[in-house]
Each structure stands twice: as structure tokens, then as C-alpha cells.
Image (spheres, helix red, strand yellow):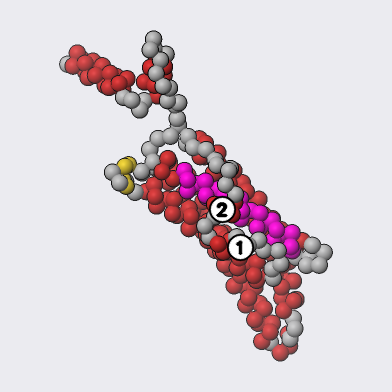
Amino acid sequence: MRQLVLVGVLALVVQLYAADDQCHYSVRQQCSSLPQKYTPCSALFSGAHTVMGSLRDFVLQHILNSHHYLLMSANFANYERQREGFAKMFKKLSDDTWEDAIDTIKYMTKRGGSMDYSRTLLESVSNSTLKPIALELTEPESLSLALDMYKNLAHKAHEIHGLVTKRSHNNQDIHDAEVISFLENKFVSKHTEIIRDLAGHSNDLMNLIKTSKKDSKMQNQAGLSVYLFDDYIKNLY
């Protein structure tokens, strides 16, 4: 019985050595007396290679959004607007989005991929609504834009998740549990919470403005409502 097991193990080792797609086989051939073309070893495995392009676009979209948030923060931090709460909130969104881009690049390289910096940001983002850089926005407009930008990121994360969740496509196994785990742990819950917060902020601010306009005792007090809401936001972030 032990001899049969040994024969089976040896047969498996021979098969592994003979497989053309194995790193060991490539190195072994390179070091042999008859050198052949060397195929570099790669950390790519499973279905990660099928979504590397999508992950690159995901990173570039994060970088673009981060710059948008930074500009929005600067818009509210100047001496004319003086909205410390909005400036603080958008600065945090900018920093968090930038860090997410860096973490995604690190993950791509860990899985054997690389980042393509040859394309410009605007060329890589297909959603034209995110292309114009907003410099002058009102408080409600800024919240609605920030919400749309984060929803766009969430949709992209779900799209990539859906690609690697499939078992196969065109007779190729594209399932990748590790990419699924990365997206779920890093982005899915986080996106949901931030989208909920931004939607709530937007609705609360609009309700305050509408109430101040309807109340006869608070005519022309919309500015005060925005000021109080800004102070509330400042304490949150």
C-alpha cells in the first residue's frame, strides 16, 4: 500500500515539473544546459488577472474624487465662505479616498498586477458627470455632488465584485475569493455608511432651508440654518 502511495506522489511530482505554466519549470529550463526563453514568475493566480484593468480604473477614480473633495474643502475654507464644518468634512473625504487608492494599488501589486500611470485621470473615468471640477458650489450642491461621487465608487466596487463572483466566463475560471474578500472588507460596508451619512446630511440641510423659508417668523433666515448646520457638521468630523 505504501509503495502505491509513493508511486502516486512521484507521478504527481513529474506532472508538476512537466507543466509549462509552472514557475519552477521555467526556472529549471533556464538553468539547464540548453537555455530557453525565460518566463518570469508571477503572483497572479485564480481570476485576479481578469479585473486588473477594472481595479486600475477604480484607483484612478479614487484619485480624481480625492482631488474633487480637496477643491470643495478649499472652497468652503476661504475667508468669504467660512464654513469650517463643510471644509473639515470634505478634507476628511479627500484624505480617506486617497488612502483607499493607495491601499488598492498595494493590493494589486500583492496579487501580481501593476498600476498604469500612462493614462490621464479624465481619460480613465467614463462617467462624464464627474469630469468638470467644481470650484464654486453652494452647501446643498456640494453635498449632492459628494453623494453622487461616492455612489459611483460603490457601483464600481460592486461591478468588480460581480465579475470575480462568477465561476466561469468564456470557458475560463474567473472566480477569485481573495478579490471578493478585499472588496467586501475594505469598501462595501464603508461605502454604504458614507452614502447613508451624505444622503442624511443633504436631506437634513434641505429640510432646514425649506422650513426657514416657510416660517413667516424666519423669513430670510436660510443663511442662519446653513450656519447652524455647518457647526453641527464641524462637531461630527
Q: Secondary structure at mark 1?
A: helix
The C terminus appears in which quarter of the rendering? bottom right
**Picture residue at 36% right of the left edge, 43% below the top:** 174
Q: Quadrant of the N terminus?
A: top left
Q: Which residue is mark 2?
A: 123
Name which residue lies at 64% across and 70% down.
141
Amino acid on which disc 2 is placed: Glu
Q: Which of the two residues, 95 or 212, is positioned nearer the viewer here?
A: 95
Where residue 206 sits, quadrant-wise, is bottom right
- Indicate left or right for 33 with 4 as reference: right
Compared with residue 60, is residue 133 higher up or lower down, i.e. above or below? below
Residue 62, visible in the rendered structure = no
Question: Residue 157, position in %: x, y?
Answer: 48, 53
Mark 1 packing: few (<14 Cα in 10 Å), some, or many (20+)?
A: many
Q: Helix, strand or loop at disc 2? A: helix
Front residue of this view, candidates 235 and 95: 95
Q: Position of residue 102 (x, y in %)?
A: 59, 43
Circle 1 sits on which residue? 146
For the residues labelled 2 and 1, the Cα–Cα distance comes to: 21 Å
**Residue 37 appears at what percent x and percent y?**
41, 21
Position above or below: 148 against 219: above
In magenta stretch: residue 178: no
Q: Position of residue 189 (x, y in %)?
A: 50, 54
Q: Are marks 2 and 1 in contact (CB under 8 Å)?
A: no
What number is the disc on residue 13? Answer: none
Magenta: main secondary structure equals helix
Q: Which segment is the magenta one?
A: 52-76
* Residue 53 highlighted magenta (yes or no): yes
Does residue 128 appear anywhere in the picture?
Answer: yes
